[in-house]
Amino acid sequence: MEPISLEKRIQDPAFGEKLTHLYGREGAGEARARCAAVIAGFTKTFESLPEALFSAPGRTEVGGNHTDHQHGHVLAASVDLDILAAAAPNQSGMIRVQSQGYPLIVVDLHELAPKPEEENTSAALIRGVAARLNALGCPLQNAGLDAYLVSNVPGGSGLSSSAAFEVLMGTMLNDLFFGGRCTAVEIAQIGQYAENVFFGKPCGLMDETASSVGGVVAIDFADTERPVVERIDLDLHAAGYALCILDSGAGHADLTGEYAAITDELKAVSRYFGKEVLRQVPWEQFLAALPQVRKAAGDRAVTRAFHFYGEDQRAREEAQALKAGEFDRFLQLVRESGRSSAMYLQNVIPTGQTVGQELMVTIALCESLLEGRGAVRVHGGGFGGTAQAFVPLDMLERFKEKTEAVLGQGSCHVVTIRPEGGVRLA
């Protein structure tokens, strides 16, 4: 009996239920159309039929701005925007990835060392994910993969399309060649390794964990080898709010140095105490040694450390507020987080910028429109990119209209929380 093709499987009612679970009733129809399109794209590109469909979502940072790389606490969630892939093994020793609208990427699985010329490219992420899985025992060097990708995670949106890409690659290779042995958290760690070692960006583990695990998650990174992940139930619509991600119009492609400066400066503070990260330095010890720390690390490093200690505590309190159903308390903490990021972490305006302050303008605009309700704060890495706003449903239409009148059509992304992370759909 011949296996049922993917084209037929995506028409099955059970598959429709899976799409409804992931994308909601309003998004299921569009999701099915995207599945059909990605299957057609694979067939045209590789002149063969795909065997499986995979999806990995973008993520939103709900709380814990720049706490993950200091082994702190974060609150994050996967969203209903994702990267979708049709894939099949090819036994060529090569990974061939065709993303819609981009050149074909080919990675030789016999060459799994970092390549300096690939830094800051998708090829580096593919090679890094494959290298780490291979080191863990996944037999890849005599394998091979063809994949065709489509994405509705906007690049530079702060929804971490890079983490979704890493999680997608890890999910596909883990499923097709490793029997699904890696857990969702391990897939996230593999993605972080690829980004740190091969891509050249010193990111933490929050983005990949949120994309890989899915839903709303409170994460404690005290032990990054074994982060503690707790799922939290949150129905924003029932609480009377929508979640908006606002594109400020400023890119973040050239801001790796700004992100690295945060980790470098916080490392300078922790190094004064003989520690690797600030999570290992008690608050009282930091405060007692403040005059000496200022001399050793500089004042900006010190104010950024103040942010870490406050934000780490806020992330825990935000999780507690959501579990207790105290949404007003949660919003108050989000507002406090936004102020701390702008004042102490200083990741809203790029260093030395006076004319181009797109993200600060975006935050000011949102605060003006919200009139004391809801909350808005920098989203993700900062400096460029996006802001995040919790908007009362009765204000949503006007809020979207007014922000897009200033920031541009399509700049306000209304997203919903997705209940699962990286997954094989069919």
Image (cartoon, helix red, strand yellow):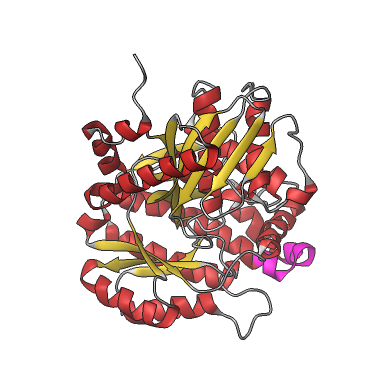
Q: Across the whole image, how many numbered discs are drawn on residues?
A: 0
In the image, is residue 147 above or below residue 63? above
Task: From the viewer's side, name the closer residue of 222 and 377.
Answer: 377
Q: Identify the residue at image location x=53%, y=78%.
A: 358
Task: From the viewer's side, name the closer residue of 149 and 78.
Answer: 149
Magenta stretch, main secondary structure class: helix
Task: From the viewer's side, name the closer residue of 337 and 166.
Answer: 166
Q: Is residue 296 magenta?
A: yes
Q: Quadrant of the N terminus?
A: top left
In the image, is residue 313 above or below residue 54? below
Q: Quadrant of the C terminus?
A: top left
x then y, percent, for residue 200: 71, 50
Q: Identify the residue at image location x=49%, y=29%.
A: 183
Task: From the viewer's side, name the closer residue of 112 and 242.
Answer: 112
Q: Identify the residue at image location x=63%, y=64%.
A: 253
Residue 365 found in image quarter? bottom left
x then y, percent, for residue 351: 67, 75
In the current view of this chain or complex, which residue is farthest to the bottom?
A: 355
x then y, percent, for residue 425: 37, 34
Q: Is residue 328 visible?
A: no
Which region of the structure is painted magenta? 291-302
